[in-house]
Image (cartoon, helix red, strand yellow):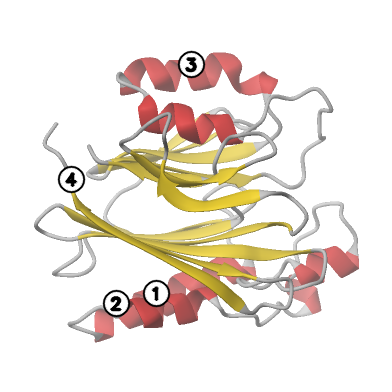
Amino acid sequence: MCILFVAINQHADYPLVIAANRDEFHRRPTAPSSFWASYPDLLAGQDLEANGTWMGVTRNGNIAALTNIRNQEQKSDARTRGELVVNALTQQDQSAFSQTLRTSRNQYNGYNLLYGHLTALTVYNNAQDRFFPLSDGIHGLSNADIQTPWPKVTRGMQSLTSYISSTRQLQQDALFTLLRDDEKAEDHLLPETGIGYEWEKLLSSIFIQSPEYGTRTSTLLLMDNQQQCHWQERTFSPQGTLTDIRKFSFQVESR
């Protein structure tokens, strides 16, 4: 998962809106969203190479999503970051889980983990060993910490703010259009994360398309006032063509 946008208590009908893109090499085997046989209450796609996931939700309202941090030295023996999302979704004690994130943070390459219950979300950055509780408002997160205003993050936050504030009836197609924004940043605004100009330019748009690497899925998670979760995942080919749509709705169980 490389970019996500979160709106908390910004729309009258949907107190939580999450719109996210997962960017990955197209050769990496992946299963589409479903409820997992190993965790029947967990809804997520699955990375079939490492058996983790990048974003998911549970029937009791736990939510988690992951973005990698780019300008960090990569450890060849690091544990898979996708397991962090599964652990966050299946944890029973949030305080203990938060402490585990701290004690295990050096076992993973750089990441941001959005996690918590639908009513109280936090982002943990293992490179900085910092927690960022999310307050009411519009938030954006990519491959730096949540306070870094990369052009595509700022652009997406502005688009989401404008759309939510101007409509009474939220349309999922409009949110997916936001996630399909392929406008690249101007050269002087590109971040410098050590991957070279060509990659910086390619990765500077919200939606990424290339033969080898790009946006594999776009996902929406909407929670309404009746505690109904609405999940839609759209899958794309290396050419950026829509190839699959998965939709789920369920009532969040009381804790």
The reply, left or right, for residue 129 in relation to residue 9 is: right
Q: Sequence order check: which comes first, mark 2 or mark 4?
A: 2
Which amino acid type is marked by label 4?
Val
Which amino acid type is marked by label 1?
Leu
Q: Sequence order check: which comes first, mark 2 or mark 3?
A: 3
Q: Do the residues bearing badges 4 and 1 touch, measured as CB atoms within 8 Å?
A: no
| Label 3 sits on residue | 100
Q: Secondary structure at mark 4?
A: loop
| Label 4 sits on residue | 252
Q: CA distance from mark 3 to mark 4?
A: 26 Å
| Label 1 sits on residue | 160
Res 229 quadrant in image? bottom left
Which amino acid type is marked by label 3?
Thr
In this view, which residue lies farthest toward the bottom? 166
The reply, left or right, for residue 72 in relation to residue 42 is: right
User: Percent position (x, y) of residue 16?
Assistant: 26, 58
Q: CA distance from mark 3 to mark 1?
A: 33 Å
Residue depicted at x 30% and y 80%: 171
Residue depicted at x 64% and y 51%: 143
Mark in front: 2 vs 4: 4
